[in-house]
Amino acid sequence: MAPIKESDDHDSEFFKPADAFFSAYGHLGLTYDDVTLATCYSEVLPGDTQLETTLAEGLTLNIPMISSDMDTVTEARMAIAMALNGGLGLIHYNMSEADQLAEVSSVKNNVHGLIQNPAKVTADQVIGDVLHLIEKKRFGFSTFPVVDGRGKLLGLLSGHVVKPRYAKRKVAEALTPRSQVHALSKKELGGDPIARADRFFTDHPGIHKLLVVDEEDRLQGLFTMSDIERINQERNAQFKPARDASFRLICGAAVSATRNAFGELDRKRILTHAEGLVERGVDVIAVSTAHGHSKGVGDSVRMLREAFPRLPIIAGNVTSAAGVEYLAACGANAIKVGQGPGSICTTRIVAGVGIPQLTALYVASRAAKKDRVTIIADGGITKSGDMVKALTLAHAVICGGIFAGCPEAPGEVMEIGGKPYKQYRGMGSIAAMKAGSAARYGHAPDPGRKVAPEGVDALKEVTNSLDRVIAQLIGGIQSGMGYLGAANLSQLRDNARFIRVSPAGQREGEPHDVVELKTGN
Ligand code: XMP
């Protein structure tokens, strides 16, 4: 472990380790911006730091980031991108159980680089329909596979003929017929589909799309040359994708403590659903509710633990040591901490309840250490510096808002005043509860009944791709670790020393007295 020089008594008088610091502030709830971390003697270069974290036996992430189980944040596309970056996506439950199973399957069956459900056209359409589709969906490409009603490949419609001058022509007349189109079967892709596709593009100059079919020649997906080239560049990345023992991407799914018409826990429904998730290869189930220190959540966790003794279980949310102890005793491995810190949360305003996040994390972390479970900081993270502070106490972070503007998040882009936005809403907002999440907040699913929303319906500006957002965040975490002389996250937790910042101290820490051209984070 990197040496910490604490010879200077002056330092230890001002910069305190977690126990001493938070005990001294027992009368005050603190959150990320209320504190800053002191630097330590370091022999660690940021780029050499390791971000691996183990949340439970059988659940290790290569970066400590999880995308939130919210209906405007995590479906299969986000979960795939999170796992490819080394993290984890938790598929939300504001959809039918069958749909959630399908989302999990889509992550677990993802072949990296293979576009599994490519845009396609049918032979009876006219080119004008295809042009309309491109405009409506804002596609940046104009070559499409052509399929029949059963998904069987009929040919390829090349971008060369998708022009207004041919608008009235039928796709059937303009397509390149199946006999002249290259396609591989899924089996032919072998153990390393990227290498196989790469070889294909080298062997076929001028061809930029490789179609993949099943035994009955039905379209299963396609590779594009530009994707393969990008993936090959990324293969040398420091943080590898998070995969299971069978080399499939990892995926989590959230469930709620669902109740039946009599208000009792619907044990059969929860168990049947969990069985379906496990059958599809889910790596972790998260019992996600606003109040985890409650009988319904505890009973659900206990039931799942009995049914699946080795399955990693996340449960929450809590903000007390007693809450952590309770869920740990019920069988949870990792416990979500956070009530009201989220960017779309109104729990503290509506219910008058919740603990500022850093104090909640400290209290929870001490119980977690005793009970040998891990904690996950859920909500309120707006910058990489918050992540560094969270990771001095927690084993991972869950983020919603930071990822909600990425193209990988569900939802359409809308333009307001010339700027692109995506919807981001609290799972306790009226709209989300109507769509199914009421149980998370302890309300009946009946949308006609009066409920008190605990979240808002909001917008996020569209951001870069998740890869780029995560690259920035990782860079920040690694810088923080370098300053603290921490080569890994365990050393970060050991080395952290805190000091409270004054409002003026906080202003000093942000760009000031300049005209800012571009924000860094
Ligand atoms: P961020 O700050 O990352 O927070 O946007 C995401 C987390 O907020 C929680 N969440 C809610 N909390 N009312 C709440 O009080 C809500 O409607 C709501 N929806 C989500 C959740 O823990 C999520 O991960």
Image: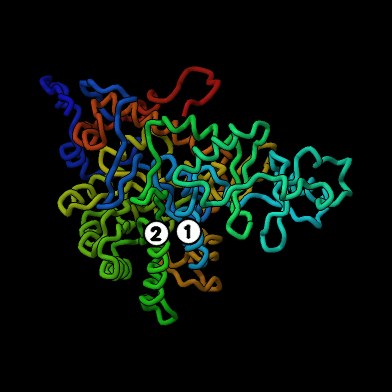
Of residues 375 and 470, the one nearer the viewer is: 470
Of residues 219 and 321, the one nearer the viewer is: 219
Q: Quadrant of residue 295?
A: bottom left
Report the disc number at residue 156.
none
Give residue 468's position: percent from left, percent from top.
49, 33
Report the disc number at residue 281.
2
Mark 1 and mark 2 residues within 8 Å of each other at the beta carbon: yes
Of residues 88 and 373, the one nearer the viewer is: 88
Q: Which kind of residue does numbered mark 2 sit on? A: Gly
Is residue 312 rendered to the left or right of residue 189?
left
Describe the colour scheme in one phrase.
rainbow
Give residue 95's position: percent from left, percent from top.
52, 64
Report the disc number at residue 105.
1
Q: Residue 297, can we see it? A: yes
Q: Secondary structure at mark 1?
A: helix
Q: Which kind of residue does numbered mark 1 sit on? A: Ser
Q: At x 45% / y 56%, what residue is drawn? A: 91
Is residue 71 rendered to the left or right of residue 509?
right
Is residue 327 rendered to the left or right of residue 275?
left
Query: In the picture, which quadrant includes the N terminus?
Result: top left
Q: Taking 216 as reference, is 471 above or below it? A: above
Q: At x 32% / y 61%, what residue is drawn? A: 292
